[in-house]
Image (cartoon, helix red, strand yellow):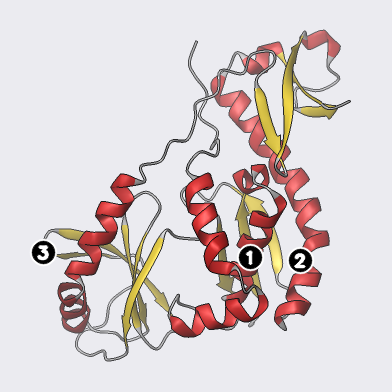
Amino acid sequence: MSIQSGPEVSQCGGDPLAEGQVLIVDGLPLTVRISPRRKRLGLTVERDGSLTLRAPQECGHRRAEDFVQASRHWIDSKLRLSEERRQLHPVRSLRNGEIHRYLGRDYRLLVVDDEDETTASLRLVAGRMRLGRSVAADPRAARRAFAVWYSSRGLRWVQGRLQPWAARMDVPEPEVDVRDLVHRWGTYRVGANGSGRMALHWAVFQLPIHLIDYVIAHELAHIRIAGHGSDYWRLLGRALPECQQLKAELDELGRRVWMGDVAVR
């Protein structure tokens, strides 16, 4: 899920763009994403301020460059907005009593002696998140422990949440996994055999449930519509009338979600 999606245009021509290439237009680097389902060019300003150009197959360089140049005012305004909303993701120290969230609820961290733990993994016991002292002292190991825990717990939770949302939106239930998606809350990809796969960032599961539901619904809507044009928002709005309010809430709260950064001691 990206921070801002912009104008779209349907005309294409000239030498075709390639998936993953970086297109430079007036000094702006744009990563090209090709989708066989798309019929229009579209622009996205990602949460980290990078630019993605979304294009249908066989879309030419010249038309893409003209489209980006014509959209320069929109791009500049959204980049300014992205800068104003600079991410405020906290850095954790992993000390006793530190607050961590799961499904919007607060849990205190308890750092325990390693001999008290049967494994090096993070565990939730009696309302406390328990982490071995040696793991807590190693930022890379600690980040991995939290990512594994949120991924495992989050996957089990979302598997029970997905079917009702898919039924509500009248779309087939996709395969789902939970992992580190860097700057995205979620993605949806069409599989080679026509089946789809949705992925969610492990950090999503720190959010309140109503915002996790929004992320799920947002990605399920992509089963029918690839881009973020007006047709997409109409579709999402039918299943989730408050989607614009939820989007704004996610934009504001999401920039303060812990993404796994651990202070070096």
Quadrant of residue 100 within the rendered picture: top right
Q: Residue 198 carries which label?
A: 1
Q: Which of marks 2 and 1 is nearer the N terminus?
A: 2
Element marked by disc 3: loop
Q: How crowded is mark 2: few (under 14 residues within 10 Å), some or many (20 or more)?
A: some
Q: Is residue 60 above or below residue 249?
A: below
Q: Indicate left or right for 4 with 76 as reference.
A: right
Amino acid residing under circle 3:
Asp
Residue 232: give x, y in percent of width and height: 51, 80
Distance from disc 1 to disc 3, alpha carbons, whole Å, reads: 34 Å
Disc sitting over residue 26 in the figure:
3
Q: Is residue 135 visible to us here?
A: yes
Which numbered marker is on residue 162?
2
Foreground pick, 168 / 197? 168
Position of residue 192 relative to residue 151, above or below, is below
Residues at badges 2 and 3 in contact (C-beta under 8 Å)?
A: no
Q: Are marks 1 and 3 in contact (CB under 8 Å)?
A: no
Q: How far apart are marks 2 and 3 (CA)?
A: 42 Å
Pointers 2 and 1 in contact (CB under 8 A)? yes
